[in-house]
Image: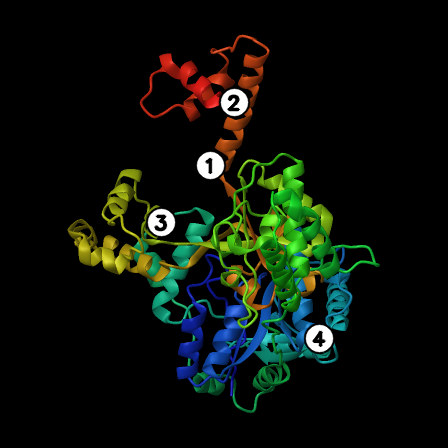
């Protein structure tokens, strides 16, 4: 039985309309027992794909479609790879990271691909007709083949087939045919929407939407397993190799591990003892009158923290906050359940005394219910980069990363994107956008029900109807990847072995996995929140301090100084006139 191995999901940004849950659900109805995911250069959807497959009783095959080069040759070629086992999956992650960080993937530099299957789609890049120097072409092909295990590199053949001479030539190179069908849509009706996505990505327009729609027909959509089995022929070598990949690839993704990082300490010290030492050293510095209640509470919290294995976590958070305070970076007072931890207060992670305000530690950590600790660190948005760079330098490039998030095509955005492809003017696009009600979680279907203006626009002509149908198909699909506003991961192990990465900003890498998927594989997420209001408070305090020093030294306060004016504008009450700015500032200082 044919297995659908080569599938681009919506995580191949602006290249596919396939949402992973819909893919697996539809494939199961069509008789598939094994499914693959081969997004373009990335593994964004790997965890979601794995979890959804298990939930539906489908065997998952991890793969990717890479744009590759080999050696110093100028030729480039596409290559599907599939992980045979967990080691192969880790190789797959490293290949994806290499491609997304350096923008290149030179297979000549790869040590070994023996835990992977490879598939050359229709021989693209290596067809004899594409090369004047056939001998040189053969040498490159053989060199690539030797990177894989014996009989693990195949020539991909779709149901359209290849000419017998091409198949024979690849057989001479010991590269056997393998059945594959690349898909980027679940149904034939979505082919035009995929074409529109290409135009969105390229920033181009469709000149004649009727003609473009007629031409956007493709056989590369999800078809029933028995239908494709018949197309390739049950006894064909190509189908048997497809079945071989499906049978031999078996990856059990390790989820819910405890990949907690360790705080770097001298060999003679351990995290629990060091945490206890600094907590009791700092207790009298934070509490004016230390009573037995404080000592007992601190001792209890430390015992729970140690029992749950979070000693290093608290030391890491303390170290980050200690750096911030040394650099005179204003930090938040602490919020959420972390404010109930005396350990956090003693270490100046929070500024709320939980005993004074009768706050419960158990809301934060409970030994009877294992949950990861979650302390949100509030820092000024204009100094967040200093914190991130400190963490990167302390733990290393390959052991710290920010977390990816995806911007999706919401109702108004997708209409603007599609309208540009259809050649609408700015004023016409604005009419469509204004026809969508301003409400949370608004969808195109809901907007159509609620907005007379939208219904009138849709029914106005055929072009508008086609536009709206395409927009509904694309709605909710990921459009771009960006950086999570707060999330950071730190690991003891090399992140390249745990999660696929990509280029981020300021030299800090970005996980290809989202926040939920990062936590699913067991990495610890920390939130460093950059807040604008803390930047304002920081600037205001510095300004007040400077002005108060001038008052003490009886220096005239320069009211025309732009910095002074900015300060007064921040601190004066709303509606107060410029004439009483100085008086109000004096009150603040005093």
Q: Tag on residue 115?
A: 4
Residue 413 badge: 3
Q: Quickly name the residue at label 1.
A: 533
First reached walking from the N terminus: tag 1 or tag 4: 4
Alpha-carbon span between mark 3 and mark 1: 29 Å
Spatial CA span between label 1 and label 2: 16 Å
Q: State the image coordinates of residue 120 (x, y, percent, origin top left).
A: 63, 70
User: Seen from this angle, which residue lies furthest right?
Assistant: 268
Image depth: mark 2 or mark 3 in front: 2
Give the secondary structure at mark 4. loop
Q: CA distance from mark 4 to mark 2?
A: 64 Å
Question: Is residue 74 at least partly visible in the picture?
Answer: no
Where residue 469 appears, as percent x and y from the top left, is: 28, 60
The answer to which of marks 4 and 2 sits earlier in the sequence is 4
The answer to which image quadrant residue 311 occupies is bottom right
Residue drawn at x 76%, y 54% is 264
Left/right placement of residue 415 relative to residue 28 reads: left
- The residue pinned by badge 2 equals 544
The scheme the figure's colours follow is rainbow
The Cα–Cα distance between marks 1 and 4, rounded to whole angstroms, is 51 Å
Q: How many marks?
A: 4
Residue toward you, 33 or 540: 540
Mark 4 to mark 3: distance in Å? 42 Å
Q: Residue at point 50% right, 59% down?
A: 360
SS at mark 2? helix
- N-terminal label among 3 and 1: 3
Q: Counting other residues with Cα less than 10 Å from the Cα at mark 1, is it few (<14), some (14-19), or many (20 or more)?
A: few
Q: CA distance from mark 2 to mark 3?
A: 44 Å
Please name whichever residue, 482 or 388, is drawn nearer the observer in this view of the structure: 388
**In-front residue for pair 116/530:** 530
Within 10 Å of the Cα at label 2, are there few (<14), some (14-19), or many (20+) other Cα atoms? many
């Amino acid at each position: 039985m044919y297995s659908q191995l080569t599938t681009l999901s919506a995580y191949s940004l602006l290249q596919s309309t396939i949402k992973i849950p819909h893919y697996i659900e539809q494939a199961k109805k069509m008789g598939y027992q094994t499914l693959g995911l081969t997004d373009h250069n990335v593994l964004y959807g790997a965890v979601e794909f794995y979890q959804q497959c298990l939930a539906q009783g489908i065997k998952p095959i991890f793969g990717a479609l890479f744009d590759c080069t080999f050696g110093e040759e100028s030729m480039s070629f596409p290559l599907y790879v599939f992980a045979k086992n967990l080691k192969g999956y880790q190789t797959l992650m490293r290949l994806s990271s290499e491609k997304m960080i350096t923008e290149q993937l030179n297979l000549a530099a790869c040590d070994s691909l023996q835990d992977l299957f490879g598939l050359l789609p229709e021989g693209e890049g290596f067809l004899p007709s594409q090369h004047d120097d056939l001998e040189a072409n053969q040498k490159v092909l053989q060199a690539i083949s030797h990177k894989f295990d014996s009989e693990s590199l195949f020539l991909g053949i779709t149901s359209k087939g290849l000419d017998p001479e091409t198949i024979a030539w690849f057989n001479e190179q010991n590269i056997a045919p393998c059945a594959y069908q690349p898909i980027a849509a679940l149904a034939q009706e979505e082919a035009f929407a995929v074409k529109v996505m290409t135009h969105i990505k390229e920033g181009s327009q469709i000149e004649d939407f009727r003609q473009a729609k007629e031409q956007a027909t493709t056989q590369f959509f999800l078809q029933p397993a028995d239908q494709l089995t018949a197309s390739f022929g049950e006894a064909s070598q190509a189908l048997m190799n497809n079945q071989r990949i499906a049978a031999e690839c078996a990856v059990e993704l390790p989820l819910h591990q405890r990949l907690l990082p360790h705080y770097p300490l001298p060999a003679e010290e351990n995290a629990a003892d060091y945490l206890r030492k600094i907590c009791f050293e700092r207790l009298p510095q934070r509490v004016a009158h230390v009573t037995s209640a404080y000592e007992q509470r601190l001792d209890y919290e430390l015992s729970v923290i140690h029992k749950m294995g979070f000693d290093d976590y608290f030391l890491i958070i303390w170290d980050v906050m200690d750096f911030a305070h040394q650099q005179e970076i204003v930090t938040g007072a602490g919020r959420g359940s972390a404010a109930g931890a005396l350990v956090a207060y003693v270490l100046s992670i929070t500024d709320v005394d939980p005993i004074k305000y009768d706050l419960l530690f158990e809301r934060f950590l409970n030994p009877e219910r294992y949950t990861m600790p979650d302390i949100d660190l509030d820092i000024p948005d204009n100094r967040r980069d200093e914190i991130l760079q400190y963490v990167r330098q302390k733990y290393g490039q390959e052991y710290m990363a920010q977390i990816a998030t995806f911007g999706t095509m919401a109702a108004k955005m997708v209409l603007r994107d599609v309208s540009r492809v259809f050649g609408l003017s700015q004023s016409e696009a604005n009419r469509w956008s204004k026809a969508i009600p301003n409400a949370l979680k608004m969808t195109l279907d809901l907007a159509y029900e609620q907005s007379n203006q939208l219904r009138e626009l849709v029914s106005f002509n055929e072009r508008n109807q086609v536009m709206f149908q395409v927009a509904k198909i694309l709605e909710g699909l990921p459009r771009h990847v960006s950086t999570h506003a707060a999330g950071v991961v730190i690991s003891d192990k090399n992140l390249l072995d745990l999660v696929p990465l990509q280029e981020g900003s300021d030299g800090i890498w970005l996980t290809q996995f989202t926040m939920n998927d990062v936590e699913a594989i067991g990495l610890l997420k920390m939130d460093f929140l950059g807040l604008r209001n803390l930047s304002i408070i920081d600037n205001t305090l510095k300004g007040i301090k400077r002005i108060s020093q001038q008052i003490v030294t009886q220096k005239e306060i320069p009211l025309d100084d732009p910095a002074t004016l900015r300060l007064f504008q921040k601190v004066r009450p709303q509606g107060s006139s410029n004439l009483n700015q100085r008086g109000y500032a004096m009150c603040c200082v005093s």
